[in-house]
Amino acid sequence: MQAKDSSALSTAHALPSYLNPDHLGPWGIYLQQVDRVTPYLGSLARWVETLKRPKRILVVDVPIEMDDGRIAHFEGYRVQHNLSRGPGKGGVRFHQDVTLSEVMALSAWMSIKNAAVNVPYGGAKGGIRVDPRQLSKAELERLTRRYTSEIGLLIGPTKDIPAPDVNTNGQVMAWMMDTYSMNTGATATGVVTGKPVDLGGSLGRVEATGRGVFTVGVEAAKLTGLNVQGARVAVQGFGNVGGTAGKLFADAGAKVVAVQDHTGTIRNANGLDVAALLEHVGNTGGVGGFAGAEAMDAADFWGVDCDILIPAALEGQITKDNAGQIKAKLVIEGANGPTTPEADDILNEKGVLVLPDVIANAGGVTVSYFEWVQDFSSFFWTEDEINARLVRIMQEAFAGVWAVAQEHKVTLRTATFIVACKRILHAREARGLYP
Ligand code: NAD
């Protein structure tokens, strides 16, 4: 009888196959990050398993009719990692390499991030495995609307609120909001954030993530004696996050000396004209071919002479193979998960200060929170109010994480996880297990 009970328990504890910690990939990296933080959780460590299992995973088939009459099927996901602190919140990514492991990890990083800046959300994320550049605008709209209907079981203004991520934007959010509203019979602006401003979007949302990256970068520079004026900055990814962060650093007197995106890698030791580069990206879709710079080999980007490096493209970019080349004193993670754990260790040993994604790029979700609050109250704030509140939240969150890092002599990533995991698990413990 005893043996039977314990074997039943061990089956109950066995991880579902897709949660195998030996499985490499973004979810495996997230699990390693949680393991690193567990010793600092005290009695809350009893609940840590809850962070290692997403609450809900939905995989959907998204069939659409293409313009030429063919029927195409795409794989879509929505993962709600943890809802202990509030409704799910996290973006939707359209990319040909999206996997379930990636969406699971991104949803978990949203739980950590939302808790780190103390906005009242759990963590969620979605995605479709598609290269949207291969679709016409009409196909993209049909794809977005069908996906929104398929994940309609999970989303809602008080349940789970999507937002833009890689290759999605205000237009995609407008289609999502409209589809959800049509399906539920009432205009529900608060179901997504990152909407166009005249559809219940917030001023300042488009630049919010880059502004947050810049804000924590300035705070870290002050604490480490690095002068932003004249600092040399290299940026990977010059889209929403990288483009805005690059512009704000340039406006503050820094020199953006190298930029890499999916179309090329460029440098100018005297500092690129960032406004002209943004215009070129707007016109051509990428930094490749920009006249005010010389092209360089993609592989040499990581070794560029710079003070501040901002990875703002995709995850898994800084690895054990290139971390040793990095010359920057400060790495600010605009992207989610750009640094592998091995690379993190190498940077730490070299004395490079890494501002981790889970705090550095939290500006976007912070202003998404403002947007959601404004939608509920139907009362909209000025851009100055939004930026001031954003900067205050980012500065306070960063100062809190910095203090924990000093106290425990740990990296800022581990410190952010300590702060965030404690908040999530406190909520979990206070709520208790149902039934
Ligand atoms: P975006 O689509 O606006 O820009 C992505 C950029 O990455 C583009 O410049 C693209 O050329 C570049 N890129 C793509 N593949 C690349 C490759 N293989 N090598 C080099 N560059 C490549 O996306 P975004 O919204 O700026 O998001 C960038 C990162 O920031 C993602 O990791 C995203 O999850 C994260 N993030 C975004 C937000 C937000 O509010 N948009 C918030 C938090 C985190």
Image: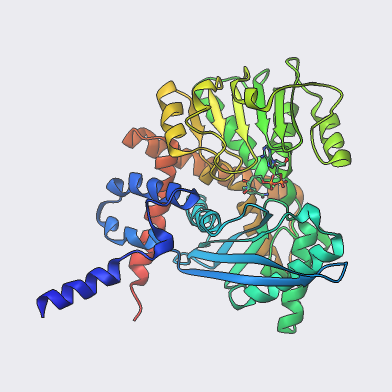
Residue 213, quarter of the rendered image? top right
Residue reaching furthest left?
2
Q: Nearer the viewer, residue 217 or 65?
A: 65
> In the figure, is residue 369 to the left or right of 113?
right
Residue shown at the point (67%, 41%) measured from the top left: 210
Q: Nearer the viewer, residue 367 or 93?
A: 93
Residue shown at the point (44%, 44%) measured from the top left: 416
Q: Can see residue 386?
A: yes
Where 58 sits versus 386, above or below? Answer: below
Where 386 sits versus 311, above or below? Answer: below
Q: Nearer the viewer, residue 208 or 8?
A: 8
> In the figure, is residue 403 to the left or right of 360?
left
Measured as percent of width and height from the top left, residue 250 is found at 73, 27
Give the quadrant of ligand 1: top right
Measured as percent of width and height from the top left, residue 53 is found at 41, 63
For the C terminus, which image quadrant? bottom left
Measured as percent of width and height from the top left, residue 163 is found at 67, 59
Residue reaching furthest top?
270
Q: Can see residue 252?
A: no
Measured as percent of width and height from the top left, residue 10 is found at 23, 68
Residue shown at the point (62%, 32%) measured from the top left: 310
Where 233 sits versus 154, above or below? Answer: above
For the N terminus, which image quadrant? bottom left
